[in-house]
Image (cartoon, helix red, strand yellow):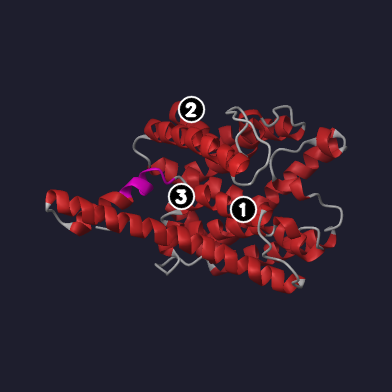
C-alpha cells in the first residue's frame, strides 16, 4: 500500500529544482533580471524546505535515529566536499567540522530541529515567543557561521510551524479565495523586489546577516528581518496553494530530494568554477542554459538512484532467490528513511 503524500512530493520536487537552479545562476546575479529571479527564489525556497521538514518530522516515529543519520551524513559529506574542493576544484580549503561546507548546514539544522522537538513541547504561543527571540538574536548576527548557528536559529520558526500544522490546515490553501489572495500578495511581493532591486543585498534571505554586517541600526535590521519573514511565509503559502496535489511526473523526483540536494553541489561547483556553460551567450540564453543544466543534474541523479536500486535488487534476488520488486523497494527505502525535506 502506497501512503505517500503526492502534494508534499510535488512541493519537494519544485523546491529542489529551485535550489539547483538558484545555485546555477548565482554567477549571473550581477544582472538585475537574474538578481530579481534569484531573490524571489531565495525568499522562500529554503524556508519552504524547512517547513516541509517540520511537517514530516511530526510523522517520524524515531526522531533521534534521524538525528544520528543526519550527523553521520554531515561528517561524511563534509570530508568528501573538502577533498573535492582541494583536489578537483583546486581551491584552498581545510578539513574542519565546526563550519559546515556550503550546503551542508541543512544537515546540522535538521539534526538540531529533530532534537529540539523531541524534548520541547511545541505550541503556537511558544512558537510566537521563539520568533521574537529569533528576531533579536539573528538581527545582530551574534551567532556567526560556526556550526551554522545563525541559520539554524533563523529558520527554526519555519520548522516549528510546519511541525504543528496538519493536512487540514494545508488544504485551506486550496480554497479559491485563499488562492486569489495569495497570488495577488505574491505578485505584490515581486513588485516590491523589482522596485528596489538595486539596493537589496543578495544575502538578504540567507539567515546569516545582521545589522552589524550591513551597516544599519538595530531598528532598521529588525524591520528587515520581519519583512524577510513575511516574504518567506507568503512564498510558502504560494507553493502550498498552487503546486499540484495529485501524482504527477515530478512526484518521483520528490522522493529523492535529499540525495539530490547533497550530490548536486559537486556538479554545480564544478560547472561554476571549471565550466564555461555561459560562454558567449546573451542573458536570455544563459537563463535557458541554466534551466537545462538544472534539469539535467536532477535527472542524472534520480536515474542513477533508480539504476542503483534496480541493480541492488537484482543482486539481492540472485542471493536470496526472492522477489526482485520487494528487494528494490527495500533499497529505495534506504533513501526514504533519511528523507527530511
Mark 3: which secondary structure? Answer: helix
Image: 317 above or below 67: below
Q: Specify start and end residues of the magenta stretch as a single range.
A: 333-339
Name the residue that disc number 3 marks: 259
Residue 270's label in the rendered image is 1
| Residue at 68%, 67% in the rendered image | 184
How many neighbours does mark 1 have within 10 angstroms: few (below 14), some (14-19), or many (20 or more)? some
Mark 1: which secondary structure? Answer: helix
**In this rendering, position of residue 210 left or right of residue 335:** right
State how far apart marks 1 and 2 are (Cα): 41 Å
* Foreground: disc 3 or disc 1: 1
Residue 24's label in the rendered image is none
Image: 175 above or below 99: below
Of residues 274 and 114, the one nearer the viewer is 274
How many neighbours does mark 3 have within 10 angstroms: few (below 14), some (14-19), or many (20 or more)? some
Residue 120's label in the rendered image is 2
Q: Main secondary structure of the magenta part?
A: helix
Amino acid at each position: 500500500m502506497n501512503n505517500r503524500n503526492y502534494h508534499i512530493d510535488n512541493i519537494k520536487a519544485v523546491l529542489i529544482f529551485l535550489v539547483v537552479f538558484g545555485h546555477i545562476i548565482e554567477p549571473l546575479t550581477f544582472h538585475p533580471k537574474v538578481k530579481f529571479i534569484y531573490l524571489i527564489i531565495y525568499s522562500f525556497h529554503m524556508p519552504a524546505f524547512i517547513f516541509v521538514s517540520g511537517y514530516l518530522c511530526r510523522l517520524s516515529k524515531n526522531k533521534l535515529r534521524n538525528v544520528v543519520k543526519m550527523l553521520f551524513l554531515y561528517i561524511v559529506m563534509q570530508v568528501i566536499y573538502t577533498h573535492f574542493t582541494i583536489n578537483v576544484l583546486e581551491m584552498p580549503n581545510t578539513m574542519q567540522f565546526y563550519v559546515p561546507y556550503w550546503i551542508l548546514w541543512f544537515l546540522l539544522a535538521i539534526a538540531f530541529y529533530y532534537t529540539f522537538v523531541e524534548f520541547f513541547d511545541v505550541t503556537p504561543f511558544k512558537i510566537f515567543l521563539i520568533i521574537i527571540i529569533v528576531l533579536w538574536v539573528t538581527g545582530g548576527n551574534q551567532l556567526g557561521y560556526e556550526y551554522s548557528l545563525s541559520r539554524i536559529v533563523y529558520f527554526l520558526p519555519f520548522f516549528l510551524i510546519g511541525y504543528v500544522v496538519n493536512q487540514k490546515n494545508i488544504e485551506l490553501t486550496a480554497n479559491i479565495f485563499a488562492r486569489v489572495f495569495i497570488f495577488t500578495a505574491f505578485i505584490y511581493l515581486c513588485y516590491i523586489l523589482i522596485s528596489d532591486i538595486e539596493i537589496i543585498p543578495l544575502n538578504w534571505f540567507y539567515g546569516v546577516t545582521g545589522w552589524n554586517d550591513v551597516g544599519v541600526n538595530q531598528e532598521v535590521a529588525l524591520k528587515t528581518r520581519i519583512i524577510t519573514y513575511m516574504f518567506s511565509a507568503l512564498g510558502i503559502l504560494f507553493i502550498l496553494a498552487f503546486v499540484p496535489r495529485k501524482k504527477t511526473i515530478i512526484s518521483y523526483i520528490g522522493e529523492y530530494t535529499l540525495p539530490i540536494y547533497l550530490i548536486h553541489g559537486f556538479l554545480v561547483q564544478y560547472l561554476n568554477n571549471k565550466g564555461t556553460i555561459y560562454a558567449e551567450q546573451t542573458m536570455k540564453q544563459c537563463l535557458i542554459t541554466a534551466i537545462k543544466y538544472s534539469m539535467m543534474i536532477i535527472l542524472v541523479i534520480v536515474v542513477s538512484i533508480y539504476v542503483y536500486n534496480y541493480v541492488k535488487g537484482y543482486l539481492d534476488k540472485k542471493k536470496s532467490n526472492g522477489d526482485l520488486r520487494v528487494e528494490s523497494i527495500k533499497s529505495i527505502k534506504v533513501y526514504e528513511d533519511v528523507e527530511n525535506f
